[in-house]
Image (cartoon, rainbow, N blue to C red):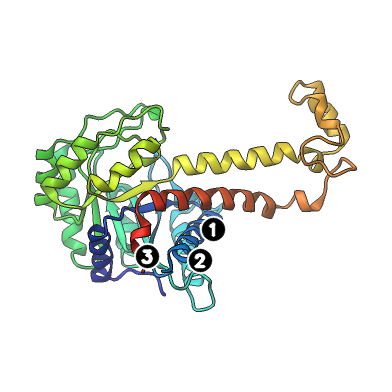
């Protein structure tokens, strides 16, 4: 099925998710490998429940200063080129020849700041299922004004997400107050957005040991505005929090940092285990002399060394590291999807 970007169809998908008590994870990406890993996760979940026509949100930022994902898609570091490449890949991955052809793929533009990403908001919004117009850096009144202006421009054409307050990112020195129910209601009423992002204790670029998700506040906000709440900074959620998310009424959950961290570590461990298949003995000895590696790496039974020690083409090309990243990212996505009740899509 082609990429889903018709406003009414997207609204129907969100409405069905709410009825089935499913949370829609928006998995972020910055390369083709991760895009396909997300689609592969959705396909495997769909096959396991007997319904391959399930929705999956693929998401990326443009020039968002905290993390500009579209600029990483190509070495050009051009966000517009990054968006075009992502849409080109999506077109191929959803065509009739693709194994992912039955999925309902919803591309999402994350953290598009009007004064930084205005051209991307204007030129690309019709290709997205949803876009986040993020004016949360500005004072509350100005944030409302900027968001409302964008909503008026694209009303009925694309699902619009707006941030009531900026999400904290202590790693970067950004610590914000939590959103009040009153502010959430006012923001929704005065902007007309389809989805709101409140600050309920989750944090960008944090792990589960640092942030404290406020389940009660989320529930109060969803009671006041409906099931139109999106959580950002969701990598900071503890595993024990995951079942609460859909119970609390959140409909969309943005996730990246935690999955990327685990996939990146998997690649690092793979390289360490295969160091005898990547470097020469002389190169290994130099690293031992520099106290970077230990003598064990010269052993024929070290890690996954295939004797004789030395570079082997099968361990040097990018495809082997891609596959390690892909498999780990995919498996974690599947875990999140099931934690957010994707089994409720079973036929």
Q: Residue at x 22, y 41 (%)?
A: 198
Query: Could you tell which of marks 1 and 2 lies nearer the N-terminus?
Result: 1
**Viewer-closest of 336 and 179:** 336
Instruction: For marks 3 and 2, give the one nearer the viewer.
Output: 3
The quarter of the picture where residue 74 lies is bottom right
**Viewer-closest of 177 and 120:** 177
Label 1, residues with CA under 10 Å away: few <14, some 14-19, many ≥20? some
Q: Is residue 304 left or right of residue 299?
A: left
Q: Secondary structure at mark 2?
A: helix
Residue 164 visible in the current orientation: yes
Residue position marked by numbered label 3 in the rendering? 346
Measured in 3D between alpha carbons, the distance from the residue under mark 3 to the one under mark 2, in whole angstroms, is 28 Å
The spot of residue 114 in percent (x, y) is: 27, 50
Q: State the mark number for residue 89.
A: 2
Query: Could you tell which of marks 3 and 1 lies nearer the N-terminus?
Result: 1
Q: Residue at x 30, y 55 (%)?
A: 22
Quadrant occupied by the N terminus: bottom left
The spot of residue 231 in percent (x, y) is: 29, 44
Vertical relation: 18 (above or below) 204:
below
> Do callouts 1 and 2 mark residues in contact (Cβ within 8 Å)?
yes
Q: Secondary structure at mark 1?
A: helix
The spot of residue 207 in percent (x, y) is: 42, 32
> Do callouts 3 and 2 mark residues in contact (Cβ within 8 Å)?
no
Q: Secondary structure at mark 3?
A: loop
Residue 142 visible in the current orientation: no
**Viewer-closest of 201 and 66:** 201
Measured in 3D between alpha carbons, the distance from the residue under mark 1 to the one under mark 2, in whole angstroms, is 7 Å
Residue position marked by numbered label 1 in the rendering? 32
Query: Could you tell which of marks 3 and 2 lies nearer the N-terminus?
Result: 2
Label 2, residues with CA under 10 Å away: few <14, some 14-19, many ≥20? some
**Viewer-closest of 86 and 294:** 294
């Amino acid at each position: 099925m082609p990429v889903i970007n018709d406003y009414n169809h997207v609204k129907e998908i969100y409405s069905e998710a709410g009825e089935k008590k499913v949370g829609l994870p928006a998995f972020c990406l910055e390369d083709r490998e991760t895009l396909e890993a997300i689609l592969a996760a959705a396909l495997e979940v769909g096959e396991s429940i007997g319904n391959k026509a399930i929705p999956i949100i693929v998401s990326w930022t443009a020039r968002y200063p905290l993390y500009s994902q579209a600029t990483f898609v190509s070495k050009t570091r051009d966000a517009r080129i990054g968006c075009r490449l992502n849409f080109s890949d999506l077109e191929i991955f959803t065509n009739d020849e693709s194994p992912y052809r039955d999925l309902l793929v919803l591309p999402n533009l994350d953290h598009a700041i009007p004064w930084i990403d205005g051209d991307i908001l204007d030129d690309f919004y019709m290709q997205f299922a949803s876009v986040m117009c993020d004016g949360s850096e500005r004072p509350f009144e100005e944030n409302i004004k900027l968001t409302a202006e964008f909503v008026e421009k694209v009303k009925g054409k694309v699902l619009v997400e707006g941030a009531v307050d900026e999400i904290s990112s202590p790693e970067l020195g950004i610590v914000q107050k939590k959103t009040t129910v009153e502010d959430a209601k006012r923001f929704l009423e005065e902007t007309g957005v389809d989805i709101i992002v409140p600050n309920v204790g989750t944090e960008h670029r944090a792990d589960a040991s640092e942030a404290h998700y406020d389940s009660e506040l989320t529930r109060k906000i969803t009671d006041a505005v409906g099931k139109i709440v999106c959580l950002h900074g969701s990598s900071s959620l503890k595993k024990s929090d995951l079942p609460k998310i859909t119970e609390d009424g959140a409909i969309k959950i943005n996730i990246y940092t935690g999955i990327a961290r685990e996939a990146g570590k998997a690649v690092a461990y793979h390289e360490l285990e295969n160091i005898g298949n990547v470097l020469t003995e002389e190169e290994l000895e130099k690293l031992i002399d520099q106290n970077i590696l230990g003598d064990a790496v010269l052993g024929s039974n070290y890690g996954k060394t295939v004797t004789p020690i030395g570079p082997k083409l099968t361990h040097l090309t990018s495809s082997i590291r891609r596959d390690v990243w892909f498999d780990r990212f995919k498996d974690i996505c599947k875990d999140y999807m099931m934690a957010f009740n994707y089994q409720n899509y079973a036929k």
